[in-house]
Image (cartoon, rainbow, N blue to C red):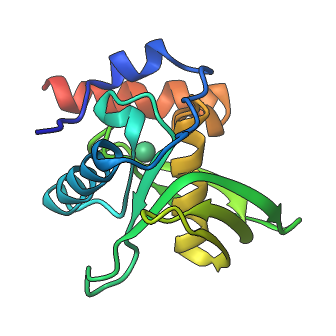
């Protein structure tokens, strides 16, 4: 069963992009399903493979209120992003309780493979766009803590660690 790795372990690979999935075999499908399971169990809206120690370009997302629309994206890429950015509060399952104000494009166009290896392309906005962007960042070795200024990061992470260690 897959587990979330500690954020310290995740940070060791900062800047290291994950490998492209060359073949969607049974193993990849199983990893993706277990990731979804973990995401729902953890009450998250998205999860990227490196968060569970798997160095592959796999993400799962579900931003619906009903929690009934699992989106599996293999080798996802952002094809286009709107020039307009929006700042909003963001969390991450690898940093439980940490909330950061992150600025991201309002809309994105995504291209990826689904679990059957079929090419899919779609446009996303709002929280859905934000979530996919956040997860693709993970695949590129970028955590949301790197999407805020150094000053904000130091201040809010110090508070977060104090609360966590209290
Ligand atoms: Ni995250």
Q: Residue furthest bottom?
A: 66
Q: With 24 as the anchor, is 17 left or right in this view?
A: right
Name the foreground residue: 119 vs 12: 119
Name the foreground residue: 154 vs 22: 22
Name the foreground residue: 82 vs 96: 82
What residue is at 52 percent from the left and 35 percent from the top?
Answer: 143
Based on the displayed image, in which of its 4 quarters is residue 61 positioned? Answer: bottom left
What residue is at 52 percent from the left and 24 percent from the top?
Answer: 154
- Residue 45, image x, y percentages: 35, 64
Quadrant containing the C terminus is top left
Q: With 73 as the anchor, is 75 left or right in this view?
A: right
Q: With 63 as the anchor, is 32 left or right in this view?
A: left
Based on the displayed image, in which of its 4 quarters is residue 122 positioned? Answer: bottom right
Q: Residue furthest top?
A: 12
- Residue 23, image x, y percentages: 49, 44
Vertical position of residue 163 compared to residue 85: above or below: above
- Residue 84, image x, y percentages: 84, 68
Q: With 103 as the anchor, is 16 left or right in this view?
A: left
Quadrant of ligand 1: it is top left
- Residue 125, image x, y percentages: 65, 78
Report whether residue 149 is seen: yes
What residue is at 52 percent from the left and 61 percent from the top?
Answer: 117
What residue is at 59 percent from the left and 20 percent from the top?
Answer: 16
Vertical position of residue 154 compared to residue 145: above or below: above
Q: How many marks?
A: 0
Report whether residue 87 is seen: no
Quadrant containing the N terminus is top left
Vertical position of residue 125 compared to residue 26: above or below: below
């Amino acid at each position: 069963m897959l587990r979330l790795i500690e954020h310290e372990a995740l940070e060791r690979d900062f800047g290291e992009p994950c490998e492209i999935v060359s073949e969607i075999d049974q193993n990849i499908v199983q990893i993706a399903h277990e990731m979804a399971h973990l995401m729902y169990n953890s009450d998250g809206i998205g999860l990227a493979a490196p968060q569970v120690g798997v160095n592959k370009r796999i993400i799962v997302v579900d931003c619906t209120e009903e929690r009934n629309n699992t989106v599996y994206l293999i080798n996802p890429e952002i094809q286009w992003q709107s020039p307009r950015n929006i700042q909003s509060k963001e969390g991450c399952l690898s940093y439980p309780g940490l909330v950061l104000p992150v600025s991201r494009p309002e809309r994105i166009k995504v291209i990826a493979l689904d679990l059957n290896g079929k090419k899919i392309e779609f446009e996303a906005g709002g929280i859905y766009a934000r979530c996919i962007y956040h997860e693709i960042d993970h695949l590129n070795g970028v955590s949301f803590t790197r999407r805020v200024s150094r000053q904000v990061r130091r201040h809010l992470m110090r508070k977060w660690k104090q609360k966590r260690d209290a």
